[in-house]
Image (cartoon, rainbow, N blue to C red):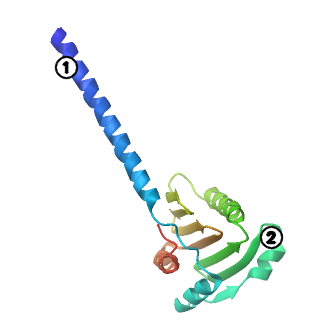
Amino acid sequence: MAKVRLDEKVTVRGIVFLILTILGLFGLFVLMVNIGEDKVPATYEQVYNTLEEYNCDAKDSTEQYLEAYPNIGLKYVISARDTNFLFDYYEFESTDDAYGAYQRLNAGINENFSRDSVETGADLRNYIIHTYLYNGEYYYLMKVDNTVLYCESSEANKDLVNDIAYSLGYYH
């Protein structure tokens, strides 16, 4: 009988040790990820030129968006559209304004997805990123300081979206 209790104590101690080790390693991982450098927000000119380099028809949509959304702290908008691709870059007056827009866009995306969708996300340092893939549709949403990058595409154009985002420094 005493031997069984001793084995049970050793097993419990082993499990507790394993759990604490895993939690410690996870904490260390989170700390290391957050120690990295802040991302630099892309400029209006950088986004416009990058879209042109990728043969996307970049347009200044600032006036159109300011008329539709006059009180959200919006400064500039660049858009690119074709049949299987939508790209919007927003620059705001403040990081709080950008965060509000990020939340509204993310909520809109989430309305369209089910549990079967594939979502990745991170909220680190000065940026937040989410990507979604569901039923052949791909969404890319990232906030860096006072800017937001929002893209929709077919799954076939996912690499184009990721390449443009990477070129702008908007990647995880």
The disc at residue 69 is: 2
Residue 115 position (above or below residue 109): above
Q: Residues within 10 Å of mark 1 (few under 14, many from 20)?
A: few
Residue 136 position (above or below residue 85): above
Residue 79's spot in the image, x, y percent? 66, 81
The disc at residue 7 is: 1
The kind of secondary structure element at disc 2 is: loop
Residue 59's spot in the image, x, y percent? 68, 87
Which residue is farthest left?
3
Residue 3's spot in the image, x, y percent? 16, 13
Name the residue located 70 percent from the left edge and 79 percent from the top edge.
77
Residue 112's spot in the image, x, y percent? 62, 59
The quadrant of the image that shows the N terminus is: top left
Q: Disc 2 residue type?
A: Tyr
Is 52 on the left or on the right of 92, as rendered? left
Give the total number of marks visible in the rendering. Answer: 2
Name the residue located 62 percent from the left edge and 87 percent from the top edge.
45
Compare residues 84 and 97 and report the one nearer the observer: 97
Q: Disc 1 residue type?
A: Asp
The kind of secondary structure element at disc 1 is: helix
Which of disc 1 and disc 2 is earlier in sequence?
1
Q: Quadrant of residue 58?
A: bottom right
Q: Quadrant of residue 145?
A: bottom right
Callouts 2 and 1 close, C-beta under 8 Å: no
The disc at residue 73 is: none
Name the residue located 67 percent from the left edge and 82 percent from the top edge.
78
Q: How crowded is mark 2: few (under 14 residues within 10 Å), some or many (20 or more)?
A: few
